[in-house]
Image (cartoon, rainbow, N blue to C red):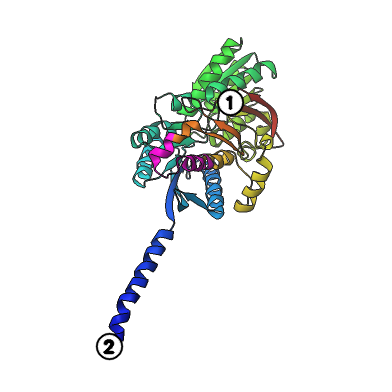
């Protein structure tokens, strides 16, 4: 019996070793994709919407199965909160680099994306923002910065043109929230407004934490403009419009994509119906895959799309498309494939120019009826 046991031991050990090797060979490679947006603060609902879009894409890809370089890959979402704060944005950007993510989807706000972009550039990790519209983001000379929305250099003029030609606005007051996004959009609007012959009666600055706008609005009431352009997010834009109505201003309120959300009806109350706003991308109802995406999103998360979820969803698929073309999950090899992207997804066809901007931007214009967002027009740039 002792002799037989010794004879069996090497065989058993060999079988166990082979089984271990087989298990290791078939074990999934876990690849992290980072996502950053404000999950706390006034824009948390928008940050969560963005994160949900990325999460939905990752769950779908994992369910279908993904093989890169002959190895099965499981994607993991590395979600971070930047609080829409530039300092916090750089801290979480470094964390994602340390976490060895293959790519980053984000940040939501231009004021967060711009400072964080230097960190991703230094690390050689591609950054695809679904919503940062300030032109500076892709004008820094970095090879890692991309976005899947139009820029404020397109959005501001589109909004000004609509105000001049469709709303017959002759005089306008401009207010921005002093962020890279709000100030950048307001400045682009103002330049075009002046070129179209509109008189800009004033340009005031508030901040992205403000709750009381009555001093600025009282001054603007005395200027009696046809419209007020507000550069900022819905968390402040909603109360701004509400207080304007309470003070009896006749002016139409114009705003960009930060204000142009499904939540605006709740934030502005009945004053939402006095707002015309732009969105730096194709309207969800005009997206070829918009209806199917909306249904999937609603089923998974139990509420409608807020705004940018389709853009984060496509951004994840764009990263995976680059991984497939690189036949690698190495960040440098994935980054090298991004400039050659030609991806047809929910938001349409994504092709980047040499700076990382879309070759064909689209601006959608909306108003609100009984607090509900309603499409006015789509402008192809």
Residue in the foreground of this view, choosing between 152 and 75: 75
Q: Is residue 208 visible?
A: no
Q: Position of residue 165 (x, y in %)?
A: 68, 16
> Label 1 neighbourhood size at 10 Å, few (<14), some (14-19), many (20+)?
some
Residue plotted at (68% across, 30% down): 367
Q: Position of residue 128 (x, y in %)?
A: 47, 36
Q: Choose mark 1 or mark 2, whichever is in front.
A: 2
Classify 33 as above or below 198. Answer: below
Classify residue 340 as left or right of residue 116.
Answer: right
Q: What kind of element bears circle 1?
A: loop
Q: Is residue 227 visible?
A: yes
In the drawing, what numbered circle is on residue 360?
A: 1
Q: Position of residue 21 (x, y in %)?
A: 37, 63
Q: Is residue 331 magenta?
A: yes
Main secondary structure type of the part rendered in magenta: helix
> Label 2 neighbourhood size at 10 Å, few (<14), some (14-19), many (20+)?
few
Residue plotted at (40% across, 25% down): 140
Q: Residue furthest bottom?
A: 1
CA–CA distance between discs 1 and 2? 78 Å
- Residue tagged by mark 2? 2
In the drawing, what numbered circle is on residue 97?
A: none
Residue span colored magenta: 316-336
Residue in the foreground of this view, choosing between 78 and 260: 78
Where, by quadrant of the figure, is residue 253 drawn? top right
Classify 178 as above or below 65. Answer: above
Residue in the foreground of this view, choosing between 30 and 337: 337
Where, by quadrant of the figure, is residue 4 drawn? bottom left
The numbered mark, 1 or 2, whose residue comes first in the sequence reads: 2
Locate the N terminus by quadrant. Answer: bottom left
Q: Position of residue 161 (x, y in %)?
A: 63, 17
């Amino acid at each position: 019996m002792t002799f037989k046991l010794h004879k069996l031991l090497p065989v058993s050990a060999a079988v166990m070793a082979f089984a271990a090797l087989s298990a290791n060979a078939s074990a999934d490679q876990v690849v992290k994709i980072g996502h950053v947006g404000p999950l706390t603060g006034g824009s948390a609902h928008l940050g969560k919407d963005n994160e949900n879009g990325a999460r939905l894409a990752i769950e779908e890809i994992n369910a279908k199965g993904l093989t890169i370089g002959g190895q099965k890959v499981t994607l993991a979402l590395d979600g971070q909160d930047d609080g829409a704060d530039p300092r916090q944005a750089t801290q979480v950007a470094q964390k994602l680099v340390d976490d060895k993510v293959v790519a980053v989807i984000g940040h939501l706000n231009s004021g967060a994306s711009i400072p964080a972009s230097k960190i991703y550039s230094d690390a050689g990790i591609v950054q695809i923002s679904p919503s940062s519209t300030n032109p500076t983001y892709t004008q820094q000379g970095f090879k890692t910065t991309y976005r899947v929305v139009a820029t404020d250099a397109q959005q501001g003029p589109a909004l000004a043109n609509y105000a001049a030609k469709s709303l017959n606005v002759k005089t306008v007051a401009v207010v921005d929230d002093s962020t890279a996004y709000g100030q950048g959009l307001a400045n682009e609007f103002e330049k075009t407004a002046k070129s179209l012959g509109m008189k800009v009666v004033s340009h005031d600055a508030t901040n992205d934490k403000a709750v009381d706008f009555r001093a600025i609005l009282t001054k603007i009431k005395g200027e009696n403009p046809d419209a007020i352009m507000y550069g900022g997010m819905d968390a402040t834009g909603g109360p701004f419009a509400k207080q304007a109505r309470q003070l009896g201003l006749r002016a139409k309120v114009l705003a960009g994509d930060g204000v142009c959300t499904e939540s605006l009806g709740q934030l502005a109350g009945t004053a939402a119906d006095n707002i015309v706003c732009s969105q730096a991308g194709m309207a969800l109802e005009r997206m070829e895959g918009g209806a199917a995406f909306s249904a999937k999103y609603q089923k998974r998360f139990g509420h409608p799309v807020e705004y940018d979820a389709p853009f984060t969803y496509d951004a994840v698929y764009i990263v995976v498309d680059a991984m497939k073309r690189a036949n690698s999950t190495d960040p440098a090899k994935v980054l090298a494939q991004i400039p050659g992207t030609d991806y047809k997804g929910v938001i349409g066809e994504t092709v980047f120019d040499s700076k990382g901007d879309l070759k064909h931007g689209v601006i959608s214009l909306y108003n609100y009826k009984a607090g509900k967002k309603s499409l006015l027009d789509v402008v192809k740039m």
